Amino acid sequence: MAIDYAGHCRLSVAEARMRIAEARQAHPDWFDFPFRLTDPRALRNFDAGIAREFGIEAQSRFTLFVQDKEKLDGLEDALDYLYALFGPDNLVLTWGLDTIRPPRG
């Protein structure tokens, strides 16, 4: 079973790509391995509908994949970092496209 989180984002693809690049640079210990962030992409109608169900008018989406299920240390901190980087009003992270993982705090 794969562990992945979808980031539904209000930001444009270009803006989201800049934030993802910033995340990779700031935390290679998370985002090179054990987690992998995909490059953001524009939403298709189906994906936009899913995002609306989670309460966000998203323009782009990325995915965080857990590459090694034995190394989950830092996962919750990495997810919270993404919320802080994007802003909690601009991002909704979902696990498996069906459950919101809200920011902690």
Image (cartoon, grey):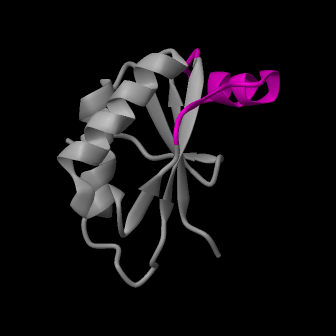
Provide residue 40's location: percent of width, then percent of height. Answer: 54, 33
Assess whether residue 42 is covered by the magenta stretch: yes
In the current view of this chain or complex, which residue is farthest to the bottom? 70
- In the figure, 100 relative to 43: above or below? below
Q: Residue at coordinates 23% horizontally, 63% vertically from top-left?
A: 29
Quadrant containing the N terminus is bottom right
Q: Residue at coordinates 66% horizontally, 27% vertically from top-left?
A: 53
Q: Quadrant of residue 54?
A: top right
Provide residue 78's location: percent of width, then percent of height. Answer: 28, 52
Q: Is residue 104 visible?
A: no
Quadrant containing the C terminus is top left
- In the figure, 67 relative to 20: above or below? below
Q: Is residue 16 visible?
A: yes
Disc tally is 0
Q: Quadrant of residue 34?
A: bottom left
Give the camera-side residue of 70 and 96. Answer: 70
Q: Quadrant of residue 22?
A: top left
Provide residue 104's location: percent of width, then percent of height. Answer: 26, 45
- In the figure, 3 relative to 90: above or below? below
- In the figure, 85 relative to 59: above or below? below
Q: Residue at coordinates 26% horizontally, 72% vertically from top-left?
A: 73
In the current view of this chain or complex, which residue is farthest to the right? 46
Q: Residue at coordinates 62% horizontally, 54% vertically from top-left?
A: 96
Q: Which residues are magenta?
A: 39-57
Provide residue 45's location: percent of width, then percent of height. Answer: 80, 21
Q: Could you tell whether 13 is left or right of 86 in the image?
A: right
